[in-house]
Image (tube, rainbow, N blue to C red):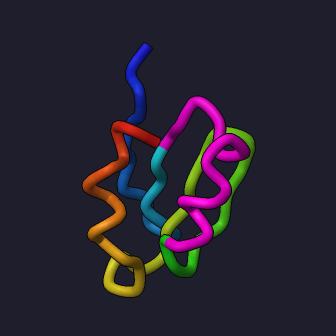
């Protein structure tokens, strides 16, 4: 199983993670987003801190 997967959608870009709850602290610093059990939804990539995405495989 991959560590994460990415899917560009019309409403929001979706990043699939094993669990978002285990990464709550890191995700809080990301910027405006919503989460599901294992999904991170980002409506506008220009509004998030892209420096944090460099650590996505570690999330």
Residue lying furthest front: 25
Where residue 1 sits, quadrant-wise, is: top left
Asked if 29 appears above or below 2 in the picture, the reply is below
Which range is magenta?
A: 16-29
Q: Nearer the viewer, residue 42 or 25?
A: 25
Across and down, in percent, residue 50 comes to: 29, 71
Side of 53 relative to 26 (left or right)? left
Q: Quadrant of residue 57?
A: top left
Q: Which residue is drawn at 67% across and 41% down?
A: 22
Which residue shows up at 57% across the image and 62% down it?
A: 27
User: Percent from the top left, x then y, of residue 10?
Assistant: 44, 66
- Above or below, 18 against 14 in this view is above
- In the depicted structure, whether residue 26 falls above or below residue 36: below
Q: In this view, does 7 lie above or below 10?
A: above
Magenta includes 55? no
Percent across and percent down for residue 16 are 51, 40
From the viewer's perspective, tell me whether residue 57 is left or right of residue 19: left
- Magenta span includes 22: yes
- Residue furthest bottom in the image: 47
Number of numbered labels in the structure image: 0
Q: Which residue is drawn at 36% across and 56% down?
A: 8
Front in this rendered view, residue 1 or 21: 21
Front-most of residues 26 and 48? 26
Residue at 48%, 53% (x, y): give it: 14
x, y percentage for residue 25? Answer: 63, 60
């Amino acid at each position: 199983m991959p560590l994460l997967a990415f899917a560009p959608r019309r409403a929001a870009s979706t990043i699939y993670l094993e669990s978002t709850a285990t990464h709550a602290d890191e995700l809080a610093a990301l910027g405006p987003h919503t989460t599901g059990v294992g999904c991170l939804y980002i409506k506008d990539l220009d509004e998030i801190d892209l420096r944090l995405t460099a650590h996505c495989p570690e999330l």
